[in-house]
Image: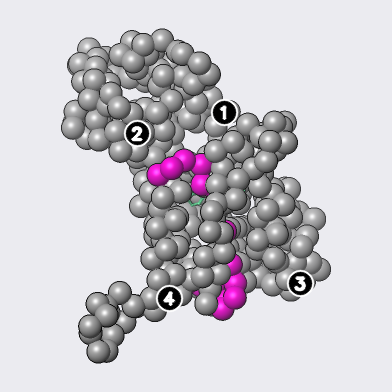
Amino acid sequence: MTYHTPVLLKEVVNQLQPRRGGLYVDCTVGGGGHAREILRACGPEGQLIGLDWDDEAIAASRERLSEFGARVQLVRASYVELERVLMSLGVTVVDGVLFDLGVSSRQFDEPGRGFSVLRDGPLDMRMSRQLGATARDILRTASLEELAKIFRVYGEEKRSRAVARTIVAERERAPLETTTQLARLVEQVLGPKRGAIHPATRVFQGLRIAVNNELANLRQGLDVATRFLQSGARIAVISFHSLEDRIVKRFFVEKSSGCICPPELPVCGCGRKETLRIVTKKPVTADETEVGVNPRARSAKLRVAEKI
Ligand code: SAH
């Protein structure tokens, strides 16, 4: 079974333009699909540092990338810790960075991880086993308000309060333990499945983002990664839903706009300088052929910026 089919593979390599002998960082190395192509493109001396939060991803990419020997270094860490990781490896500048967000197909398809609304498993949803609270813990301890907010803001679920109210009523009787229990409960509130998407999909998305603190991590990760880019080096980010894409877009816009002082001010007081140039005015998306073979590519958006 393949671990994960990388999305927008050619596009990522085209955009990062790996140069021979360069040093690249894959912040979400997963099964190593993108990493492998980057390593090929920057060979025979180029190097790659791959991070992932998940032990299993590190094990899988270690195997997949073994042919590259010492050209690859894999570290189990969150990309939020990128600075510490790079310092410990003695790295001060890099030639390109990739973020491929979200969960891998392997994580998603493994019932024991609790990510999929369609597979019966424990309500876990932690990308890293080092994380404390699982989805089950949040469902058990969060207040009605907090749950509603998770479903509304992170899940973009319109009937967030109704779902939260039902969960709070239900947990008085017995704690929610499994994905199937949660999926059924949400279905009772929102009505049965219409079309291809399960009614509890958005609730699951909201919980996953909360468990892994995904949006705050992304903001921080982009910031740290950008600081390590060499002048002319690129940062490429693939996102899978609008909340993530908005963060990436705003980050790039902010970093690519300089002084924000009012024009009547004779000298700049804000001190803001542009650090990035946006390469993709519009996000790059997958073509029909790719979506045909890999449905996960349907919602993928690639944005790229270059260090000034
Ligand atoms: N590009 C990879 C697939 C990446 S899937 C490939 O070609 O195989 C996304 C990966 O990001 C998952 O393995 C997940 O564990 C990891 N991830 C998510 N959040 C992370 C974080 N904060 N730090 C490090 N890795 C993270």
Which is in the foreground here, disc 1 or disc 4? Answer: 4
Query: Which quadrant of the rendered structure holds the N terminus?
Result: top right
Residue contact between numbered discs 2 and 1, judged by CB atoms under 8 Å:
no
Above or below, 175 relative to 32: above
Spatial CA span between label 3 and label 1: 37 Å
Q: Nearer the viewer, residue 156 or 83?
A: 156
**Label 1 to label 4: alpha-carbon separation:** 43 Å
Query: Which segment is the magenta one?
Result: 227-243
Looking at the rendering, which quadrant does residue 154 occupy? Answer: top left
Is ligand 1 closer than 8 angstroms to the Cβ of mark 3?
A: no
Q: Is residue 175 within the magenta segment?
A: no
**Left or right: 153 in relation to 104:** left
In primary-sequence order, the first of circles 2 and 1 is 1
Residue located beneath label 3 in the image: 20
Q: Residue furthest front?
A: 264
Q: Give the residue displayed 30% in from the left and 74% down from the top.
A: 260
Query: Toward which corner of the image does residue 132 lie, by quadrant?
Result: top left
The CA span between labels 3 and 4 is 28 Å
Q: Give yes or no for contact between labels 2 and 4 (Cβ–Cβ under 8 Å).
A: no
